[in-house]
Image (cartoon, rainbow, N blue to C red):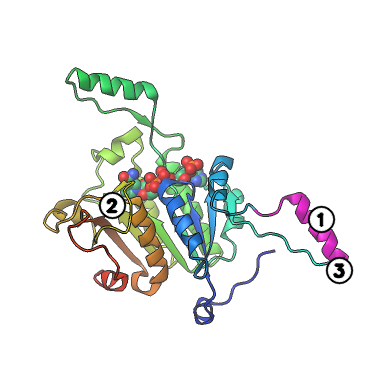
Amino acid sequence: MACQRAPLSLQMLLGVPKQVLVTGASGRTGFLTFTKLRELEKEFYVRGLVRSQKGAKKLETTGASLGDSEKIKEQNAKMRAMGLPADDDEPEVFVGDIMDRDSIQEAFDDLDALVILTSGVPKLRKREIVKTVLSKLIGRQRMPKFYYDQMPEEVDWLGCKCQIDLAKEKGIDHVVLVSSMGVSPQKNTPDNTLNKIGGGNILVWKAKAEDYLKESGLTYTIIHPGGLTNKPGGERELVLGTDDSLLDNYEQLGATRTIPREDVANLVIEVLRHKELVANKSFDVVTKDVGAGAPTKDWESLFKTLP
Ligand SMILES: NC(=O)c1ccc[n+]([C@@H]2O[C@H](COP(=O)([O-])OP(=O)(O)OC[C@H]3O[C@@H](n4cnc5c(N)ncnc54)[C@H](OP(=O)(O)O)[C@@H]3O)[C@@H](O)[C@H]2O)c1
C-alpha cells in the first residue's frame, strides 16, 4: 500500500528523502541516473520505469526490487486479516509502456519528482552497416538508413504527454525533462540531420512535448544536452546556454558540442537538489574537454548564471 507523503517543505525540514521516478531507466542515461540516485539513499527514494522484462532485469542488478509477487501479497493480506504482521515489499522497478497510461500509472503514485528519460531510439539494420562501410571503401559518402520500432511522434510526443498528464493528475512537484539541443525554431528545420533520421522528425516532437510541459502549470526543468558520449563523467567543466546559442558559439566558449551521459546524470541529480534555482527553466548543456577548465562542482553558481 503506497503511503501519503508530507508536503515537500516539511519533508526537507525533516530530512525525508525525495521520492523520484526515472522513466527510460534502462536506457543509457536513464540507467546511470537511476543507479546514482539509488546510491544517494539518504536524499532520494528512486523508482525506475522500464518497458520490458529485460529492462527490469538490468535494474535488478543494482539491487532494486520488483516488489512482492501477487501470490505473496495475497498471503500477506491473509496474515494481516488474522492480526499477524506482514508488510508488502514496495516495488522500485515498474514495467510499462509510456504509450499505455494504465500500464504506467501506478509508478506515478506519491512522487515528489519525475525525471523523463524516455526517447525514440533510432536503429540500424546490419545490412545497412555493411552497405555504408562498403560505400566508404570505394570512396562514396552514404548516409545509413535508420528506422524506429516506435516513431518519435509516439514516444517523444504522445508518450511524453502521457507522463506529463499523469504528473499533473497526481500532483507531482517537479518534472525534469531531458530533451535535446536543436529544438529551437531556428535549428529545428526539416533538413536538420536529427529530424531526417528514420524520417522521425524527432526534434519536432520533442519540441511539442516541451511546449506541452511548459503550458501544463507544473514546475519543470528542461535540459537540452549536446551530443551524448559514453565517456566518464565528473571530469569536465559544464557550459550552459539557451535557445541553441551553443550550437553557434561553443568554440568561442572553449567548449565542445558534446557531453558525457554520466555528466547528464550528475546534472539531473543537481537539478533535483536545486529545484528553486532551476524551476521553470529550460537550458542547453555541453562540456569543455578534460583539462580545459575545471570540473564543475559549484552547481549553485552554475545555475545562477541561467537567465
Ligand atoms: N544521442 C544523442 O547524442 C543525444 C543528444 C542529445 C539528447 N539526446 C536525448 O537524451 C535522452 C537520453 O538519451 P540516451 O541515448 O541515453 O537514451 P536511450 O539509451 O536511447 O534510452 C531511451 C529509453 O527510452 C525507453 N523507451 C522508449 N520507448 C519507450 C516506451 N514506449 N515506453 C517506455 N520506455 C520507452 C527505452 O526503453 P528500452 O531500454 O526498452 O529500449 C530506453 O530505455 C533522450 O531523450 C535522447 O533523445 C540524445
Please state the horizontal and vertical placement of residue 149, each as a whole percent of the image: 46, 34
Q: Earlier in the sequence, mark 3 or mark 1?
A: 1
Q: Position of residue 205 (x, y in %)?
A: 37, 46
Q: Residues within 10 Å of mark 1 (few under 14, many from 20)?
A: few
Is mark 1 in CB contact (under 8 Å) with mark 2?
no
Question: As rendered, which of 306 and 258 lies closer to the eye?
Answer: 258
Q: Quadrant of the N terminus?
A: bottom right
Q: For mark 3, what is the residue?
A: 83
The reply to whether the magenta stretch includes residue 80 is yes
From what the image shows, is residue 244 above or below residue 280? above
Identify which amino acid the numbered label 2 is placed on. Ile
Residue picked out by circle 1: 75
Magenta part of the chain = 67-83
Residue appearing at x 54%, y 52% in the figure: 62
The residue pinned by badge 2 equals 259
Query: In 3D space, how far apart are the residues under numbered discs 1 and 2 (Cα atoms)?
Result: 49 Å
Secondary structure category for the residue under label 3: loop
Residue at horizontal 23%, vertical 58%?
A: 243
Q: Amino acid at mark 1?
A: Gln
Q: Quadrant of residue 267?
A: bottom left
Q: Is residue 202 left or right of residue 237?
A: right
Label 1 element class: helix
Residue 101 appearing in the image: no
